[in-house]
Image: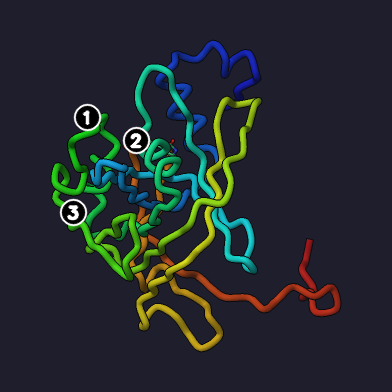
Amino acid sequence: MYLSKSDIKNTERVKRLNIINSVSGIKPGNLIGTRSSADQANLAIISSVVHLGSSPAYLGFIIRPSNEVRRHTLENILENGCFTINHIQTNFIEKAHYTSAKFDAEVSEFEACGLTEEQLYGFRAPFVGESTLKMGLKHVESVDIKSSGTQMIVGQIEHLIIPDEAMDERGYIDLAAANTAGISGLNSYYGLEKLQDFPYARVTEVPKFNV
Ligand SMILES: Cc1cc2nc3c(=O)[nH]c(=O)nc-3n(C[C@H](O)[C@H](O)[C@H](O)COP(=O)(O)O)c2cc1C
C-alpha cells in the first residue's frame, strides 16, 4: 500500500490516527505518576518518552495540551514540578492501558485501574508499585512544538530504580529480562525479545557486508 499526503488527509479520522500513531515503530510503554496540590495522585499511560541527555540525565515526553479536556498530568507537573516514569511490564498491560480513560480529577487511576501507589525517597510524585524499573524526575523545561500544538516536558532524573538481574556490569539493561512492554499505536502491546548486542560502531571496525 502507498499513501500520499492527500491520501493521508482524506483517510477517515480514526483510521488515520491508528495508521500514523503506528508508523514511528515500537514506542516505550510508560506510566507517568503525578500529584496535584490537593494531594490527588494521578497516573497516565504515555508512549512518547525519549532520552535527551545522560549528563545531566534528562528524559522528555510529548503531551498535547487541550482546551476541551483537562490534562491532569500536565497540570500537576506545572503545580508541583515533578513526576515519575514507570516502565509498563507485560504482567500489567491491561491495567496500564485503562489509565488512558478520561477520569475526573478527583479519581485516582491507581485505584480505578488496580495499581499500587508507592511513595519512595520522600519524592512528592507517586511511583507504581508493580513496576520494577522506574524513576523520579524534576521538571526542568517545557518546550512548545508549534507545528503540532504539542509540548515536550523535560525532566531530570533524581531517583532511578533498576532490577539488579536486568543490568550487567557495563550498565547494559536487558529490557526483555525486565519484561518491559512496547506499544504500537494506541492499542497494541508487545513483549520484547533481545536479539543481539553490538560494539560501539567505529569506521575502522565495520564488518565487510556483501551488497
Ligand atoms: C498507548 C497509549 C499511549 C499514549 N501516549 C500518550 C502520549 O505520549 N502523550 C499524551 O499526551 N497522551 C498519550 N496518551 C493519552 C493519555 O494516556 C490520556 O490522554 C490520558 O487521559 C491522560 O491522562 P491525564 O488527563 O490524567 O493526564 C496515550 C494513550 C494510550 C492508550
**Amino acid type shown at disc 3:** Leu
Q: Position of residue 185 (x, y in %)?
A: 42, 37
**Amino acid type shown at disc 2:** His
Q: Which mark is residue 115?
A: 3
Colour theme: rainbow
- Establish if 116 lies above or below 61: below
Residue marked by disc 2: 72
Residue 186 lies left or right of residue 142; in this view the side is left
**Amino acid type shown at disc 1:** Asp
Is the CB of mark 1 within 8 Å of ligand 1?
no
Q: Position of residue 127 (x, y in %)?
A: 30, 59
Label 2 CA crowd tier, 10 Å (few <14, some 14–19, many 20+) = many
Residue 71 lies left or right of residue 61; in this view the side is left
Label 3 CA crowd tier, 10 Å (few <14, some 14–19, many 20+) = some
* Residue displayed at 63% across by 13% down: 6
Q: Assign ligand 1 to one image quadrant.
A: top left
State which quarter of the image contains the N terminus: top right
Nearest to the observer: residue 109 or residue 174: 109
* Residue displayed at 43% across by 70% down: 160
Residue marked by disc 1: 104
